[in-house]
Image: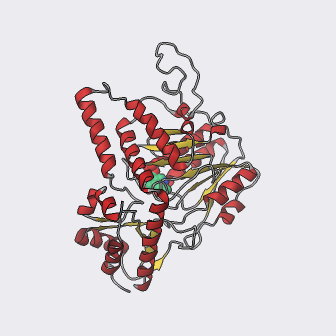
Amino acid sequence: MDIQNWRELFPITRHYSFLNHAGVAPLSKPAAEAMRAHVEQSEDRAGLGAGFYKRAEQVRRLAAAMIGAGPEEITFVKNTTEGIGWVANGLKWRPGDNVVTTAVEFPANVYPWMALRSRGVELRMVPEVDGRVPADRVLAAIDSRTRVLSVSAVQYASGFRMDLAALGMACKERGVLFCVDAIQALGVLPVDVRAMNVDFLSADGHKWLCGPEGCGIFYCRRALLNELEPVMAGWLCMKDALDFGHYRFEFVETACKFDTGSYNLAGVYGLGASIEMFLDVGLDRISGHVLTITERLTGGLREKGYRIISSRAPGEASGIVAFASDRHDHEHLRRYLEDEHRVVIAVREGRLRASPHFYNTVEEIDRLVALLPAH
Ligand SMILES: Cc1ncc(COP(=O)(O)O)c(C=O)c1O
């Protein structure tokens, strides 16, 4: 498959140059088709003969394969925040414990930890310097009372790609649990929870995975499944869950212990089809293309006098290019591009942000640069 074939998987290409996958991405065609088929089946025949939950098990395996986990370590979440909240509320805390994160996280990875203040848990937030939060600065905030390090794989407002392997290794050596908000990485950058020593990971499907909003994945390392308590007891998480009348209060021993009741099956169908598409195309290929076109974009923007906020150093670059103008109003530029030229980018934290995906072309990148006023 080449880029023209990939573009056909994204009908939005007929209407827009969509360069905001770090925001809410378009549904991929396979995701939309899978969801439509699920809706039609549900309308015409309810669940009869459909094997809805068999498909959910397949999707669990696909999600596990995508991040190098085992299927028993994966379950579905309604969003990134929910999975992070499961970790924050499922560990046993002692007053004086602390959690380390950065000062530039999306709030999904802040408030669940801040809420632990009432239990005597301190949140330490490591600041960004020049669009970077290097691993050594993060690790310097860890001390003997640090229980968890929780970071985004890629920072939403700068595009800074955290060194998950270095952070995970250091956490392992120091006995600190390592939690990753992976929503800005899954679908565009390879993530391997084993190689990176990730203990917990959460990500919704609506950004780079091009799946629906409201259905994502949560990973809990097998060895920690006993340690992390479910925040509530549901029915689907119990052993013999389908033996409804026998109230055997015993949680399953897989990540399904965090399940409560029925799944968002339309979401699971959409997410599954998208993950299948990404595995087919190949994440190395996808990240290679995205890093190439974002490099071209930063070069073009620099030539026009824009300040590049995102680090482009090897290992630190991602699919997000954050940049700034000292002369032009950012919101005005964003609206001009979208309303007059159907080029979609975003404004975040006082920066312009472009986030192209694997089906975006060099021509689209050059057009964005050409449309932006020079300094
Ligand atoms: C890093 C990061 N985490 C999480 C989210 C969204 O969280 P949720 O899936 O809980 O809505 C975003 C959305 O912008 C994000 O950029």
| Residue sitting nearer the eye, 120 or 270 | 270
Looking at the image, which residue sits at the far front? 1
Figure check: 249 above or below 289: above
Please tell me in which quadrant of the rendered image residue 51 appears.
Answer: top left
- Is 244 above or below relative to 188? above
Count how many numbered circles sit on residues in the image. 0
Picture colour scheme? secondary structure
Which image quadrant: the C terminus? Answer: bottom left
Please name the residue shown 29% across and 72% down the image: 337
Image coordinates for residue 151, horizontal then vertical, percent: 58, 55
In the picture provided, is 73 more to the left or to the right than 224? left
Q: Nearer the viewer, residue 94 or 261?
A: 261
Give the residue at x 64% y 58%: 165
Task: Name the residue: 31% across, 60% down.
Answer: 5
> In the image, 311: left or right of 342?
right
Q: Give the farthest residue toward the top.
A: 245
Q: Looking at the image, can residue 349 be seen? A: no
Q: Is residue 203 left or right of residue 18?
A: right
Q: Position of residue 110 (x, y in %)?
A: 55, 52
The percent position of residue 29, horizontal first and vertical second, equals 30, 51
Quarter in which the N terminus is drawn: bottom left
Residue at 66 percent across and 38 percent down: it is 223
- Position of residue 95 measured from the top left corner of the image (x, y, whole percent): 71, 43
Using the rendered image of the protein, determine whether residue 344 is visible from the camera's viewpoint: yes
Work out whether 190 lies above or below 317.
above
